Image (spheres, grey):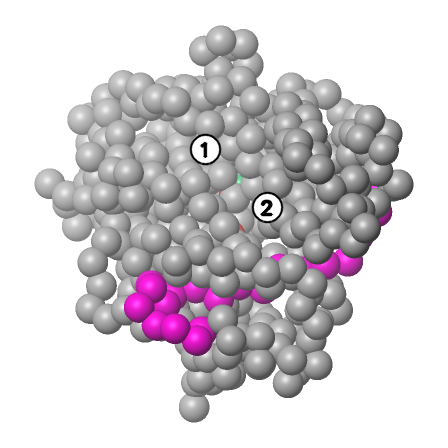
Amino acid sequence: MAFVVQKFGGTSLADADRIRNVARRVVETHRAGNNVVVVVSAMGKSTDGLIELATQISDTPHPREMDMLLTAGERISMALVAMAIEAHDVPAVSFTGSQAGILTTADHGRAEILDIRAFRVRECLDEGKVAIVAGFQGVSPDSKDVTTLGRGGSDATAVALAAALGASVCEIYTDVDGVFTADPRVVPSARKLDEVTFTEMLELANAGAGVLMARSVEFGIRYNIPIHVRSSFHDGEGTWVKEETMEEPIIRGVAHDESEAKLTVKGVPDRPGVAAAVFEPMGDAGVNIDMIVQNVSSEGITDISFTVPEAQAATAVAVAQSVAADIDATGVDLDTDISKITVVGAGMKSESGVAASMFRILSDAGVNIEMISTSTIRISCVVRGDDTQAAVEALHRGLIGDAS
Ligand code: ADP
Ligand code: ASP
Ligand code: MG
């Protein structure tokens, strides 16, 4: 008997009709003789709604209570999906993350899955029922509290569960037809990819391609679970994220990320140890640093710029100000109006000149580059936030080619 995990995102569960549609798909898969585990997100944009509600109550909501609140979203959809499946006379049981045995670290809002003890889910399947699991949540065995995995976390729940249960595939049903060469909402001429390698997908996801949470791709890599990203609105094939691939194009896709901010520590004395003095306390404060640029020093004084998630900007500024005072730097600047544009492709490994082409295309489009970073299969540039659309379109046209 094949074993399938099917994950449905918020748009796919936005109202009663769509929930009925999801149930119909699940029932079809079940009736075809498969063991089905369904992972659900919260309905529509209800997670955003809950966050908004919390900010109306408190500027600094307690992380434990925030997770208590947000996990309610997935609890609503799991129960409704179970009811919709039962309406087809197929037995279905819903489980919270905790009931499904999803054990996580105690870091509220960004917990990591440590282990999955899916006894109840297995029992449910052994009894011939469909199991529905609330995505995005777990429980910490240390604190005994419910946790959330970070935005988009249902993808991680789904792939991790697929690994824990030994499923042959993890299907991610969403509101687009698959993984595209760029966000189809920004580049309407972007093309759906038939395949993308795990490592390319990981780079794209880390660079802001929100169609899959990066952590879900990491689980796919670690346990070699093929991920099929597909539309919840029709039966057509989507994109296979997997190990082997027929061809390795130089550029597979373009991604953008507007969720980072740039900090500059100005007038830093250029002497050994200053970079450590800036970044060690950032690490201690849990700030995730992405790109770093240190300017050429002039008369022994330099600037250090780096990017952090916008959500951590306030913490990062506080840390930077205290460090600046310690090392006699002149000040700290925060710039939230930036955007990171990334091109990804496994074929880049063996091709020279890709960076130069990228810089030429951005320059021809009148886009100024503020920071650059590269890996073997990725090049990222920080540009002005207002230039996002122009930069992504120009790079897509110049490096991938628009669909005809
Ligand atoms: P879900 O609620 O199903 O998890 P998400 O909103 O998290 O859906 O992810 C799907 C969205 O990801 C799409 O609507 C699309 O705008 C966005 N997206 C960003 N980059 C890409 C890409 N390269 N390919 C497809 N979709 C992308
Ligand atoms: N509902 C959560 C979110 O909006 C998790 C998810 O959709 O994957 O981030
Ligand atoms: Mg998502």
Q: Amino acid at mark 1?
A: Ala
In the picture, the disc for residue 134 is: 1
Residue 194, label in figure = none
Task: Decide whether residue 195 is among the magenta residues.
Answer: no
Residue lying farthest to the bottom in this orientation: 404
On the image, the x and y values in percent for residue 15 come to 56, 51
Quadrant, the N terminus: top left
Q: Is residue 11 above or below residue 366?
A: above
Does residue 341 appear anywhere in the picture? yes
Residue 148 appears at what percent x and percent y? 54, 29
Q: Residues in magenta?
A: 332-354
**Residue reaching furthest left?**
1
Residue 126 spot, x, y in % from top left: 18, 26
Which residue is at a point 47% across and 84% down the rendered structure image? 402
Q: As shown in the figure, which amino acid type bears the numbered disc 2?
A: Asp
Q: Helix, strand, or loop for circle 1?
A: strand
Front position in the image: 154 or 134: 154
Does residue 132 lie above or below 199 as drawn?
above
Image point 39% across, 73% down: which residue? 352
The image's mark for residue 290 is: 2
Residue 346 is a magenta residue: yes
Residue shown at 70%/55% (left/top)? Answer: 296
In the foreground, 221 or 128: 221
As drawn, which residue projects farthest toward the right? 330
